Amino acid sequence: MLLLPPSSQYDGGPKYLDPDSPEGSSTDGWWFEAGMQRTAVPSFFVIGPAGEFGIHAGQWTPLHKTVEGWVEALALTHHASMWAKQTKITGDAVDGIALDAFKPVREVMGLADAWWRGTDSLVAIYSGEAESPPFPKAALR
């Protein structure tokens, strides 16, 4: 079991990594619940068929290519929160962010959620909730 720092999104995310019994099938792939959630949310955190970390809320939404990517994103979030000015942009305004001068932070192995680094700046975009059906379309991205 691995105790995790709270995520800035997803109501804190799982409290710890402690995979449970698999669910799914050999044809569609197996999912493992990733661990106990910090709060009641309309989804659960899972490790997907190819080792991805994501949320399942009636539909599978992979957030990171690996569990390690999720852990790296948590560590980066914690580090950035201590040093950076934070600006939160939601909804359609996210589409206006120009990332041309930024490079992806490969360590987070982002899929629906990803980080980019630029000169003296970091940008995180969380679109997992926006891509999951139970969440309102105006959810954070």
Image: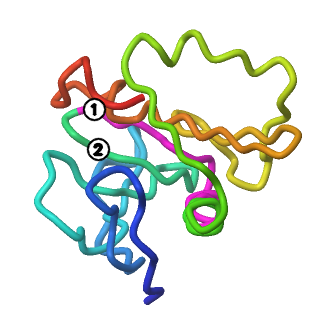
Q: Which mark is residue 56?
A: 2
Farthest residue toward the front? 85
Query: Where is residue 133 shown, x and y percent of the image?
Result: 22, 25
- What residue is shown at x 37% (from left), y 55% (from top)? 31
Helix, strand or loop at label 1? It is loop
Query: Where is residue 102 shown, x and y percent of the image?
Result: 83, 30
Magenta segment includes 31: no
Circle 2/circle 1 CB separation < 8 Å: yes
Amino acid beneath label 1: Gln
- What residue is shown at x 56% (from left), y 56% (from top)? 51
Helix, strand or loop at label 2? It is strand
- What residue is shown at x 87% (from left), y 23% (from top)? 101
What's the CA distance linking mark 2 and mark 1? Answer: 5 Å
Query: 61 or 141, which is in the foreground?
Result: 141
Magenta segment includes 65: yes
Q: In this figure, which residue is indicated by the disc labeled 1?
A: 59
Left or right: 127 in relation to 52: left
Against 86, residue 133 (above or below) is: above
- What residue is shown at x 46% (from left), y 13% (from top)? 93
Left or right: 11 in relation to 53: left
Viewport quadrant of the N terminus: bottom left
Query: 93 or 73, which is in the foreground?
Result: 93
Left or right: 92 in relation to 21: right
Alpha-carbon neighbours of circle 2 within 10 Å: few (<14), some, or many (≥20)?
many
Viewport quadrant of the C terminus: top left
Query: Where is residue 87 shown, x and y percent of the image?
Result: 51, 38
Against 97, residue 108 (above or below) is: below
Amino acid beneath label 2: His
Q: In this picture, which residue range is highlighted in magenta?
A: 59-73
